[in-house]
């Protein structure tokens, strides 16, 4: 498999420390069936739900095998059934904070100091976004060197649930020559926070 499938887990003590940081920060505010394909568009994209997140991805992408999912990232889609070069996945609420930047910092610390994404992980641009349906939202780009020394690119979307203040994370990562800027931006424009009853 080309993409790094290391289990991403944050220790309880680490989460507790970050939760305390979150509580000290000033702020202005205090889930269709998972993985369901809701429609197929003529553009060659399919609309799917990953938990409470709606996103459009290429029509040929397939659900990530259950054996590849983790406790933190319980579901996703791959660009191929075997040896995928791109994976998109979702992490439901994992920390006791309504602040997307705190969750991003936790994942960045893991990536930097625990090597959860492989070698030479680097944080890229971070920006506050207006993701439809989210109370707060943030995107953060990153790069790293994956399996087989492939240059990898990725993006996180962080979305705060306006009712529960839980932060959901959508992640995409893939080989830089496959996950092109155009494809990344097309997916980016489709992301919505859309809880299902």
Image (cartoon, rainbow, N blue to C red):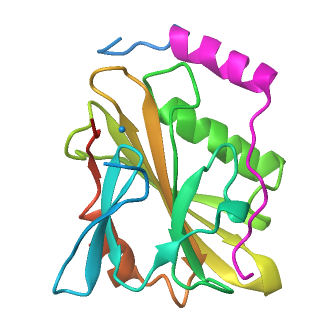
Instruction: Judge from the rendering whether residue 61 lies leftward or rightward of residue 120; answer left or right.
Output: left
Query: Which residue is nearer to you in this view: 52 or 117?
Result: 52
Q: Nearer the viewer, residue 165 or 62?
A: 62
Query: Of residues 57 and 155, which is closer to you in this image?
Result: 57
Residue 21 left/right relative to 116: left
> Picture quarter containing residue 21?
top right
Say if 191 sits above or below 159 in the image. Answer: below
Find residue 46 and report its horizontal and vertical position in percent.
29, 75
Please identify the quarter of the rendering in which residue 151 is found. Answer: bottom right
Question: Is 180 left, or right, of 5 in this rendering?
Answer: left
Residue 165: x percent and y percent? 37, 22
Q: Position of residue 134 (x, y in %)?
A: 27, 37
Q: Compared to 104, does 3 lie above or below?
A: below
The reply to whether the magenta stretch includes residue 16 is yes
Q: Residue at x 69, y 75 (%)?
A: 3
Find out whether residue 3 is within the magenta segment. yes
Looking at the image, how many numbered discs can be counted on the residues?
0
Residue 190 in the figure: left or right of residue 35? left
Question: Which residue is at the far left?
Answer: 42
Residue at horizontal 74%, vertical 35%? 10
What x and y, as percent, mark residue 67? Answer: 73, 63
Can I make out residue 186 in this image?
A: yes
Q: Image point 43% across, 84% down: which residue?
A: 180
Q: Quadrant of the C terminus?
A: top left
Identity of the residue furthest to the bottom in this view: 177
Q: Specify the segment rendered in magenta.
A: 1-23
Q: Residue at x 72, y 82 (%)?
A: 2
Splitting the image into 4 quarters, where does residue 19 fall?
A: top right
The answer to whether residue 141 is seen in the rendering is no
Q: Nearer the viewer, residue 148 or 81?
A: 81
Name the image quarter holding the N terminus. Answer: bottom right
């Amino acid at each position: 498999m080309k993409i790094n499938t290391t289990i991403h887990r944050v220790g309880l003590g680490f989460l507790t420390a970050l939760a305390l940081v979150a509580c000290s920060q000033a702020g202005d505010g205090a889930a269709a069936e998972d993985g369901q394909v809701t429609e197929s568009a003529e553009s060659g994209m399919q609309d799917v739900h990953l938990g409470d997140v709606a996103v459009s991805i290429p029509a040929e992408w397939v659900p990530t095998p259950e054996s590849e999912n983790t406790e933190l990232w319980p579901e996703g889609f791959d660009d191929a059934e075997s040896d995928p070069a791109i994976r998109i996945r979702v992490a439901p609420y994992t920390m006791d904070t309504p602040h997307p930047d705190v969750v991003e910092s936790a994942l960045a610390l893991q990536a930097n100091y625990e090597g959860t994404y492989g070698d030479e992980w680097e944080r890229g641009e971070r920006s506050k976004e207006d993701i439809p349906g989210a109370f707060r939202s943030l995107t953060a780009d990153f790069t790293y060197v994956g399996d087989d020394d492939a240059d990898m690119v990725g993006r996180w979307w962080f979305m705060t649930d306006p009712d529960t203040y839980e932060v959901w994370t959508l992640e995409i990562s893939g080989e830089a020559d496959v996950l092109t800027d155009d494809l990344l931006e097309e997916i980016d424009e489709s992301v919505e926070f859309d809880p299902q009853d």
